[in-house]
Image (spheres, rainbow, N blue to C red):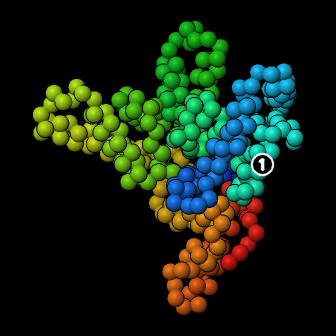
Amino acid sequence: MGKRKRIGYGALDWIDNRNSQIWLQDKFLKTIEKLEPKKERKPLGDLAERPFEDFARFRDKQDRKSKLRRQQVFERLEKQSGRLSFFSLFGEDDPLRKAIWQWGETYHLNSEWCYEVALLSLQNWHQFNDRAGKRFTPPPFYGHPNYLGFGSLVMVHNLASMRRDSLNERQKALVDSFSEQEKRFVESFNERQRAFLSSYSLDPHIQSDAFSLNQMEGLIDAGLSLPVFNLLGSQEFKNLRDTLFERATELLERVNETAKKNSSVKPMEVGADEVNKHLEWAVRYQVFEESYYSIEGNKYGHRRDKLRAYARVRKGVLRILELVDLKPRAAIR
């Protein structure tokens, strides 16, 4: 294992570099989505043009040449070993591969993981026939190890309480691999809390309390929008909403308490705001081609302050690009 590369403090200090990198790559993509509407350069918009058209032709055309092309890709997939790479299944002269590669060059997203994201995004847009609400499909990411598949942990916990001779071989293997720590983790929550966490994860290692509470408040309001709740009076409705939010707050406190006992990684404390700021700097520089000076330097009048801002931005940008595995574009001030 290589040297640990810390992203930030507390919440952002993952236990391994790969987990850290995938999480940060996802945040990098979401920052592009957030900034693009106000920018002239349109990475998502352009991906939905020529590359999408080439992908649709690859999937939909039924002539002999197209069928042979798909067959070759599927044959390469069957032979592939190690980490799965869909982009590498396409030959160097393949039109779809060329279109994605050119898109990556245009927006300085010229790394293997970016090509994979582009291809998976095209596949989803084509499958669901929806480019209007387009979003990147991020690299597979499963959250903090202790919050990986809470629903699955509950399932195995339930299997462990059943008679062993009633289980099949695969279920027995799952039960045998169920550690005491995982058992204690599941049993830290009551049945209703387990049911909630199986559907909606609360991970204090990557989410602040404010974010989690806002997310749960949205879930409560969505549930209370059902017509049946119109039968309640206004005060009854308010009391029910307040009760649900109180229960959600109690659950979050329980999750935070359990996280401290069951993990070597501290729940969110400090660092997220700083990392998010550096992420935005990196996206503005790398993808939207803003200069180091223009990102922060315009806030200052004195040349010395501008130079300090330039150095601060450059350092933050280069660090983020290294962490997400992107080669910095040619430097300009």
**Residue at position x 76%, y 55% in the image:** 105
Question: Which one is in front, 54 or 234?
Answer: 54
Q: Residue 290: which quarter of the image?
A: bottom right
Q: Residue beneath label 1, please? A: 101
- Dot 1 crowding, Cα within 10 Å, few <14, some 14–19, many 20+: many
Q: Is residue 198 left or right of residue 315?
A: left
Q: Residue 125: which quarter of the image?
A: top right
Residue 22, x across and y down, in percent? 64, 48
Q: Amino acid at mark 1?
A: Trp
**Residue at position x 48%, y 45% in the image:** 203
Q: Check disc 1 and report its element: helix, strand or loop.
A: helix
Q: Is residue 146 above or below residue 327?
A: above
Q: Is residue 191 above or below residue 282?
A: above
Q: How many marks?
A: 1
Residue 87, x across and y down, in percent? 77, 39
Q: Residue 83: which quarter of the image?
A: top right
**Residue at position x 28%, y 42% in the image:** 245
